[in-house]
Amino acid sequence: MKYCSSCGSDQIEFNIPKEDNLPRYCCHHCGMIHYQNPNIVAGCLLTFKGQILLCRRAIEPRYGCWTIPAGFMENHETLEQAAKRETWEEAKAVVNELMLYAIVSIPAISQVYVLFKAELAQAIYAAGSESLEVQLFEPKAIPWDELAFPVIIRCLDYYLKDRATGKFQTHIDTIYPSSQTVIHH
Ligand SMILES: [Zn+2]
């Protein structure tokens, strides 16, 4: 941060304010402390008769890799609205009932993924502007080596394991930089 977004001054220093314990961007002109907090990514694992909907990314990072519809939550929306909006923007699919399926913290990049699970009423979907293509995959056809992010691998892994036992539950998990992603399928 070079300039204060409140007063425009360049008298910004990154230091620990009084009675705080972490460094913040502090403006010495107007006194504003600029707190920075994790971003929430909301998304949907969509299924249709046992198949899983994946989108091939038309944007960086990980252009050309497969993911589930997910993206940064906007101000003033709810988690469910964010998940449904991303599903519409990236996969042109409409979902109604959402089940909270996974909360995955990624502390190294200050992100928290909140992923819902939903069954499509019909196989109606299309590539939105951020997707090259959208496709339903049978579990055996999931392109594991071309998935965009470790959290996507983790989420599909939960789904296949839950599917095998028939019990779908909410997963709370953390991804560390050193986490090994082990696939058992
Ligand atoms: Zn200022």
Image: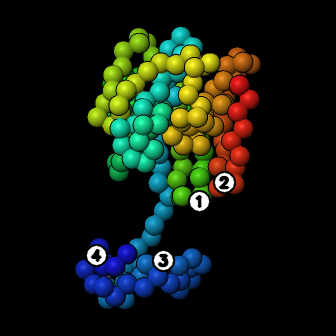
Dot placed on the residue nearer the N-terminal end, 2 or 3: 3
Residue at 42%, 37% in the rendered image: 64
Look at the numbered discs 4 and 3 and tell me whether their residues touch, using CB distance below 8 Å. Answer: no
- In the image, residue 34 above or below residue 91: below
Residue that label 2 marks: 176
Label 1 Cα crowd, 10 Å radius (few <14 / some 14-19 / many 20+) = few
Q: In the rendering, at what x and y percent does residue 155 appear?
A: 60, 34
Q: Which residue is mark 4?
A: 6
Badge 1 vs badge 4, beta-carbon distance below 8 Å:
no
* Rendered view: 167 above or below 132: above
Q: Which mark is residue 108?
A: 1
Q: Is residue 88 left or right of residue 101?
A: left
Q: Residues within 10 Å of mark 4 (few under 14, many from 20)?
A: few
First in residue order: circle 1 vs circle 4:
4
**Contact flag, marks 3 and 1 (Cβ < 8 Å):** no
Residue 115 in percent (x, y) is at 53, 36
Q: Amino acid at mark 4?
A: Ser
User: Any atom of ligand 1 within 8 Å of the CB at mark 2?
Assistant: no
